[in-house]
Amino acid sequence: MNRYGQWSWLAVSLVGHAWLAYATPRTDTAQLLLLWCGLFLLYGLLWIKQVEKDFLLFVGAAVLFRLLWLFAMPALSDDVYRFIWDGRLLSHGYNPFLHLPSDIIDKGWAQEIGLGQELFQKLNSPDYYTVYPPLLQGWFAVATVVGGSTYSAAIWLKVPLLLAEVGSLWLVYQLVKDSAGGELKARRSVLLYGLNPLVIAELTGNIHYEGLTIFFLLACFYFWKNQRLHLSALMLALAVGVKLLPLIFLPLLISRLRLREQIRYVVIVGIGVLLPFLPFLDWTIWYNMSDSLGLYFQRFEFNAGLYYLLRAVGTWLVGYNPIGTLGPVLSLISFTTILFLSFYRKLPFSLYERALLILTVYLLCATTVHPWYVVPLVALGALTRFRYPVVWSALLPFTYLAYGQVPFAESLWVVAVEYLVVGGWLVAEVSTLSE
């Protein structure tokens, strides 16, 4: 790509990101999908043109796109309002794990600390206890105090995500540069993750803290690679402290250690995860969080290919939606497969590839798969030979079709095509790379 082509690509991409960030509600299906398709076409064009030679220019573009999203109020997700709700509770001395929004909305003290009807009406789960761990709760409180208004607080909530994303780009480079392919492969991996439109929009744009999880998980692998197991365990604990999901990688990591090292690693992770809970000092929070998580896995449904297939069969057999049974069954299948991928040594996959497949299994068995759930898969995929996570990321924007209908309704045809394409691509890559 010549210099004119580079600057043209950058200018058009900037317009596309700005339009998506500042002038596209998720209910405007036609405009939303047009912009997503355009941005992914521009993203795909880079790999045809082999832009690794202009590495620094395009790394700068990756950071610039994230800065562009920094001042946009999230339009594709309403999670930010729960972050602000929890932050205002904690910053005024109330334990966010103990108060249901629907229970306190009519209380006078809630109005006094900024928890009014305007914010309440934007919450997507007012009848559920918060599920965000203490590390995030602390930042929610800081952001709401420093920011003040809802808009300013939202900007502050994005700051650690922006910094984490820059750190993740550096970590991807460090993790790949010493592998087969060397410098060129490392550059391609950084741009593969850094310029992915879904990654940019869902993390820095829509404030999903998978961005922090990715950074800490990559740091965990970085210290693991450099034989600094204590720091690796600490980074894994921090990743779990942001999102509980990275615990699924613990069996994989300890499977490669001696017994004494395994015990030490698990202890460090355990202490690192539990320590932030100490300031709250109320055992009720464990019940409330587990209750909300349990309801989440047993009641929420979105973009779940395997689950939808089993649900259809189950409904035909028993006459009602068997999510209460299917959720635990799929969790058991996921758990068993994760252990197999972690401990069975004869599989022809690297540590990063096993981690990628472990997360893939978890997502395929989940009853809810929002677009941002797949972003960590894109990060792990950048460390490996697999490219199906990129394919999945390009298909996920079509799930936003559900929000363009009133009432909310998914298109099962969209879900079917998504999972058939991703599943077929995954099988093809596994078959090819395992030969």
Image: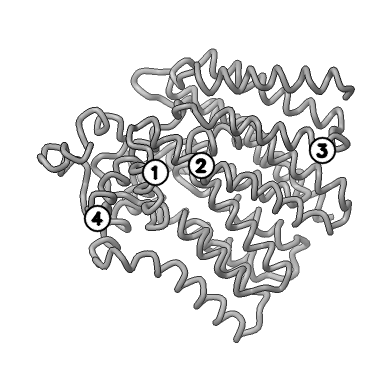
Nearer the observer: mark 4 or 1; the answer is 1
* Image height of 26 relative to 251, above or below: above
Nearer the observer: mark 3 or 2; the answer is 2
Whether residue 391 is visible: no
User: Residue 48 sits in which quadrant?
Assistant: top right
Q: Which amino acid, mark 1?
A: Ala
Q: Is mark 4 on a helix, strand or loop?
A: loop
Q: Which mark is residue 302?
A: none
Nearer the observer: mark 1 or 3; the answer is 1
Mark 4 crowd level (few <14, some 14–19, many ≥20, 10 Å Cα)? some
Residue 430 percent across, percent down from the top left: 75, 50
Q: Which mark is residue 95?
A: 4
Q: What element carries label 3?
A: helix
Q: Are marks 4 and 2 in contact (CB under 8 Å)?
A: no
Q: Earlier in the sequence, mark 4 or mark 1?
A: 4
Q: Which mark is residue 55?
A: 3
Q: Earlier in the sequence, mark 4 or mark 2?
A: 4
**Residue 16 located left or right of residue 172:** left
Tally the numbered discs: 4
Query: Could you give the CA–CA distance between mark 1 and mark 2, rounded to whole angstroms?
Result: 9 Å
Mark 2 crowd level (few <14, some 14–19, many ≥20, 10 Å Cα)? some
Tag 1 residue: 143
Q: Residue 159 carries which label?
A: 2
Q: Which amino acid, mark 3?
A: Phe
Q: Which of marks 3 and 2 is nearer the N terminus?
A: 3
Question: In front here: 159 or 1?
Answer: 159
User: Residue 127 sits in which quadrant?
Assistant: top left
Whether residue 21 is visible: yes
